[in-house]
Each structure stands twice: as C-alpha cells, then as structure tokens.
Amino acid sequence: LKSQSQIMTYVQTGGLSGTIEFLFRDIREGKQQITDETVSHLQNALKKIAASVEAIDAENKESDLSQDISTMKQFTGIS
C-alpha cells in the first residue's frame, strides 16, 4: 500500500503506511515489543488509512494524515 499510494501521489496515505511498515520491521528484528499500546497505535493507523482510501475512492482526495504520521513516527522513533 505504501508504494502504490506514493506512486499515485497519495503521499500521506503512503507515509502512514510506511510508519506501519517500519514498526513491523522493528518488531520482527526485536527492537520493538508488541504491547497493548502498540496494538492501539496500529488499530488507529489502520482505521485512518481505511478512511483515507475511502475518501480517495469517493472524492479522489486523501485525508490529512499529517498528525497521525507524526504520532506514529514519535511512537516508533522514526525521524
């Protein structure tokens, strides 16, 4: 979803997808643990991505996900 979104110029949807990708990579590498907080952040991000995809489908315009990207970056430690 990250690459497809970015290719189609839906940068924020791709950006939030990318933060999820980094989180899963860190979990796989043992740098991050799966906690209730992790699951909560993932659920929220996935809901926001789903809403953005729906907006793209309905209006050809993605949602503003800048705050969600910032929150996920802060949680995951992505700079």
Image (cartoon, helix red, strand yellow):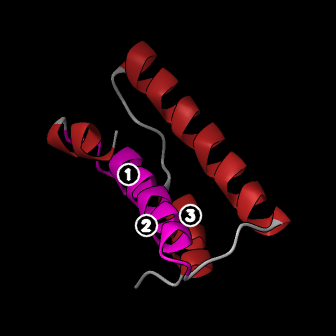
Quarter occupied by residue 57:
top left
Which tag, 2 or 3, sits closer to the chain's start? Answer: 2
Q: Position of residue 29 (x, y in %)?
A: 47, 75
Q: Position of residue 13 (x, y in %)?
A: 40, 45
Q: Report how far apart the C-alphas of labels 2 and 1 lie in the structure.
A: 15 Å
Residue with the mark numbered 3: 67
| Residue 19, magenta (yes or no) | yes
Which tag, 2 or 1, sits closer to the chain's start? Answer: 1
Q: Nearer the viewer, residue 20 or 29?
A: 29
Q: Position of residue 73 (x, y in %)?
A: 51, 74
The extreme top residue here reads 58
Q: Is residue 4 above or below residue 42?
A: above
Q: Report how far apart the C-alphas of labels 3 and 1 lie in the structure.
A: 10 Å
Task: Determine whether label 3 and label 1 are within 8 Å by CB.
Answer: no
Q: Report how far apart the C-alphas of labels 2 and 3 lie in the structure.
A: 17 Å
Q: Nearer the viewer, residue 16 or 52?
A: 16
Q: Amino acid at mark 2?
A: Phe
Q: Amino acid at mark 1?
A: Gln
Q: Range of the magenta residues?
A: 9-30
Residue with the mark numbered 2: 22
Give the secondary structure at mark 1. helix
Q: Position of residue 3 (x, y in %)?
A: 23, 45
Determine the residue positioned at 74% across, 56% down: 39
Q: Quadrant of the C terminus?
A: bottom left
Residue with the mark numbered 1: 12
Residue count near mark 3 (Cα–Cα under 10 Å), binned few <14, some 14–19, many ≥20: few
Residue count near mark 2 (Cα–Cα under 10 Å), binned few <14, some 14–19, many ≥20: some
Q: Amino acid at mark 3?
A: Gln
Q: Is residue 1 above or below residue 24?
A: above
Give the secondary structure at mark 2. helix
